[in-house]
Amino acid sequence: MAIHFTWRITKYNPKYRDEKGVYLRDEWTSISEIGSITNDNGMLKTHDYISTENKYVKAILDIMSCLDIQKLSIFGLEKWEDTLDTTNFSSLYNENMKSLHGQVTNGLWLEKDQISDLSRLILREKIWCKLKYDSKMYVHFGHDFYMFIGSEMMCEDTINNIEKSGLYVEDFISPIKEED
């Protein structure tokens, strides 16, 4: 099969976009803002950040489950440091994340627990890559907590559950090129 359904999945409510799709509210966009005052909800607390991050990870894993996919492959890898720098927010990085950071390569297949850790590293701006499973599914990450997922199936119940979690799902083609 092929990718027939594509979504932009974010923490950003689409009602606050202008006619060109530009998001108009000033909200936190990075782990580096933990402990800082933000315009949307006061101070960004660690548990609020992790709660949001968990929703993104769960969205990926739930769509994988809908498609009966057990693993995804890495491509388009970009790594900015050989050793994971956990100086800031060190308590948020487990040993598996540190190990995975050192092992990731293009073409590497990751199981669901590794996808969870890798997605967190991407959302925390420590690494960047795209994930895919043949022509059944892809996951692309943009800046500022933008995530794009493509699927061969609609996964309607899964999409509804993602929306119920507090994320917003919009029909949207990923602006990130698919080439390896």
Image (cartoon, grey):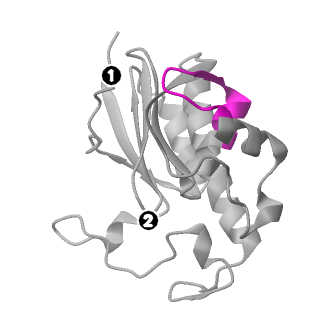
Range of magenta residues: 103-117
Q: Residue at x 54, y 30 (%)?
A: 63
Q: Residue at x 34, y 73 (%)?
A: 16
Q: Residue at x 65, y 80 (%)?
A: 44
3D distance between C-alphas at marks 1 and 2: 24 Å
Quadrant of the image containing the N terminus: top left
Kind of residue at disc 2:
Tyr
Residue 9 image point, x, y percent: 44, 50
Q: Which mark, by number, is residue 3?
A: 1
Q: Residue at x 42, y 29 (%)?
A: 138
Residue at the spot of label 2? 12
Residue 97 image point, x, y percent: 73, 44
* Left or right placement of residue 32 versus residue 147 in this view: right
* Of the pair 73 and 150, the residue shown nearer to us: 73
Q: Where 113 sits versus 163, above or below?
A: above
Q: Residue furthest front?
A: 82
Q: Residue furthest top?
A: 1
Are the residues flagged by discs 1 and 2 in contact, CB closer than 8 Å? no
